[in-house]
Amino acid sequence: MADVLVAEGLGARTRRGWVFRGVDLTVGEDELVTLDGAAGSGRTSLLLALAGYFRTTEGTVRRLARPALGFVAGVNEPEPGLTVAEHVEERLVLLGRASWNLRRRRRQALDRLEGVPLDPRTLGRDLDRLGAHLLCLTLARVGEPGIILADDVDQGLCEVERKMLLEALRDTGAAVVVTERAA
């Protein structure tokens, strides 16, 4: 199994002190890794640093596969006024994959979450927490990343929804790194 992400001695310090420090992590392809910790422990910042969206002050991160963010509240979440289908269309356009067969590509992207309740007509503002995670996962998958990173997969979800989300993450064919408050 090849590595898709390697962090060595990773740390981030601000004027107020260390956000996280001394993180060593290796993620292999098809692996699901969970980072857990209490609120305010730096989980989300670490996740964003691993994806390349948060500046670190020490250590190194090597991304050996293209990363993509799943749901990260306040950073990567559904646009309230767009439908699920419009989100997918927008992502296809941004990735340069929109063409005469846009509807077919949109359907393919949505079909990847077979068995998951995600209505293409639902507005972003009307999605529950599971729906927001699933939409962001769908959008991440459009770019065919080697690793997907998602935040707080245990917050606002019942146990059945959490299991459904983790199953959908495992079925992506990518390595996955998630955060949660409880192990």
Image (cartoon, grey):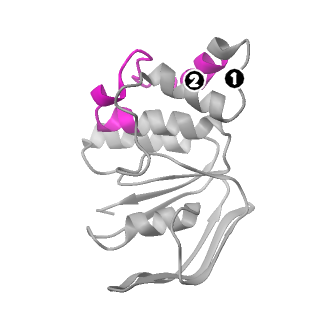
Between 181 and 126, the one lying in front of the other is: 126
Residue at x 49%, y 62% (from the top left corner): 48
Q: Position of residue 73 (x, y in %)?
A: 35, 50
- Residue designated by label 1: 98
Residue 82 in percent (x, y) is at: 41, 25
In the image, 43 versus 87, the foreground residue is 87
Who is closer to the viewer here, 74 or 175? 74
Residue 115 visible in rendering = no
Q: Which quadrant would the N terminus be assigned to in this image?
A: bottom right
- Which element is circle 1 on? loop
Q: Amino acid at mark 2?
A: Glu
- Number of numbered labels in the structure image: 2
Residue identified by numbered label 2: 89
Label 2: which secondary element: helix
Whether residue 122 is in magenta: the answer is yes
Residue 72 appears in the figure: yes
Q: Amino acid at mark 1?
A: Ala
Above or below, 136 relative to 32? above
Which residue is drawn at the image coordinates 66% and 46% (left, top)? 145
Check if mark 2's residue and mark 1's residue have beta carbons within 8 Å: yes
Segment colored magenta: 105-132
Horizontally, residue 33 falls left or right of residue 67, namely left
Q: Could you tell me which residue is drawn at 42 percent across and 21 percent down?
A: 83
Q: CA distance from mark 2 to mark 1?
A: 7 Å
Residue placed at 32% from the left, 70% from the top?
Answer: 37
| 72, 114: nearer the viewer | 72
